[in-house]
Image (tube, rainbow, N blue to C red):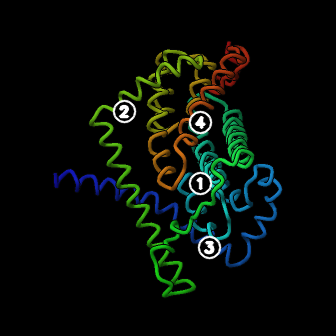
């Protein structure tokens, strides 16, 4: 048991330092930008666009950080700007699902491009889905009154756990240490959960449950297994497996496009969902709703795309 806990702690530590290398610089840059008034300037610039989504301007900064840096970069920005914005539960969930649908675009869509789908098309797919679903959640919450309670994000900065014994840079250091400690705890619990799911066979059962949904969406049975792996573990894994499957089975461009559309919209579902739920997101919105949206989009793509209309990036020509 002791060996297992040491091994788990070591694994969690490696994951934490990988995340911390992204989060701490982003948090520092956002803190400096807020101090110099740059956040207010950027907020005013993107306010009209965010108003269309029924979200405050600062939410746009969070999402943009996630789009270019990744989910943890978005979380770092969320932590830094949380004192500047007021969110309802509906708006918070809209922001969370937007980060889940569209994050790490430069890196992840480069993997998708290498696996055989258009960078531009899959990027537009992710951004469009994020904007539409985010707007639907935010406006739907406002119209219905569901999830209309205000959300307190003070705990993200550690303000609920710290006495106001410092100000200025020292206060930022203190709150950052508390925040990163909570992130470390979340990562440890996540690693424990993933390991338990693997040992108990939950991952295999989830894989079996996803297979019919993939086929229902019109996905080719040959790529359903490797797509499922990517959905559960991440786009990097799934993309690599699709590359290998495409070379081995001579998959045409349309088959690869549909599989990679699935992965672009829904991947790393266990880790990413657990992180967002730990922050306070609603699992029905960030998991069940995202799954249903992906199923619908891919089914429509399967219905209205034809083999001779999908460019093949690997061949530099149209697939025939």
Q: Are marks 4 and 1 in contact (CB under 8 Å)?
A: no
Residue drawn at 80 percent across, 59 percent down: 47
Q: Residue 69: which disc?
A: 1
Give the mark nearest the N terminus, 3 or 2. 3
Image check: 299 left or right of 202? right
Residue picked out by circle 3: 31
Give the mark nearest the N terminus, 3 or 4. 3
Residue picked out by circle 2: 203
Between the C-alphas of marks 3 and 4, the distance is: 33 Å
Residue drawn at 48 percent across, 40 percent down: 268
Secondary structure category for the residue under label 4: helix
Residue picked out by circle 4: 289
Which image quarter holds the C terminus?
top right
Q: Position of residue 316 (x, y in %)?
A: 68, 25
Of residues 254 and 151, the one drawn nearer to the viewer in this rendering: 151
Q: How many marks?
A: 4
């Amino acid at each position: 048991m002791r060996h297992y806990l040491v091994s788990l702690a070591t694994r969690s530590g490696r994951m934490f330092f990988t995340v911390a290398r992204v989060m701490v610089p982003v948090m520092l840059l956002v803190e400096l930008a807020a101090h110099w008034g740059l956040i207010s300037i950027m907020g005013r610039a993107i306010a009209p666009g965010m108003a269309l989504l029924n979200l405050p301007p600062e939410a746009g900064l969070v999402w943009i950080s996630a789009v270019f840096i990744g989910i943890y970069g978005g979380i770092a920005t969320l932590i830094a700007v949380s004192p500047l914005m007021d969110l309802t539960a509906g708006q918070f969930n809209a922001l969370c699902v937007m980060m889940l649908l569209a994050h790490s675009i430069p890196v992840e869509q480069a993997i998708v491009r290498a696996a055989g789908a258009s960078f531009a098309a899959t990027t537009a797919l992710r951004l469009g889905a994020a904007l539409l679903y985010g707007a639907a959640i935010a406006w739907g919450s406002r119209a219905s009154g569901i999830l209309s309670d205000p959300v307190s994000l003070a705990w993200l900065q550690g303000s609920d756990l710290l006495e106001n014994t410092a100000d200025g840079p020292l206060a930022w250091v203190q709150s950052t240490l508390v925040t990163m400690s909570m992130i470390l705890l979340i990562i440890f619990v996540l690693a424990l959960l993933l390991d338990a799911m693997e040992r108990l066979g939950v991952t295999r059962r989830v894989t079996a449950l996803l297979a019919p949904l993939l086929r229902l969406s019109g996905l080719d049975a040959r790529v359903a297994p490797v797509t499922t792996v990517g959905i559960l573990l991440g786009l990097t894994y799934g993309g690599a497996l699709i590359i290998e499957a495409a070379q081995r089975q001579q998959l045409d461009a349309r088959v690869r496009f549909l599989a990679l559309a699935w992965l672009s919209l829904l991947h790393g579902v266990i880790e990413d969902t657990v992180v967002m739920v730990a922050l306070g997101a609603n699992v029905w919105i960030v998991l069940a709703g995202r799954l249903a949206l992906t199923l619908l989009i891919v089914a429509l793509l399967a219905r209205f795309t034809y083999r001779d209309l999908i460019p093949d990036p690997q061949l530099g020509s149209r697939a025939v």
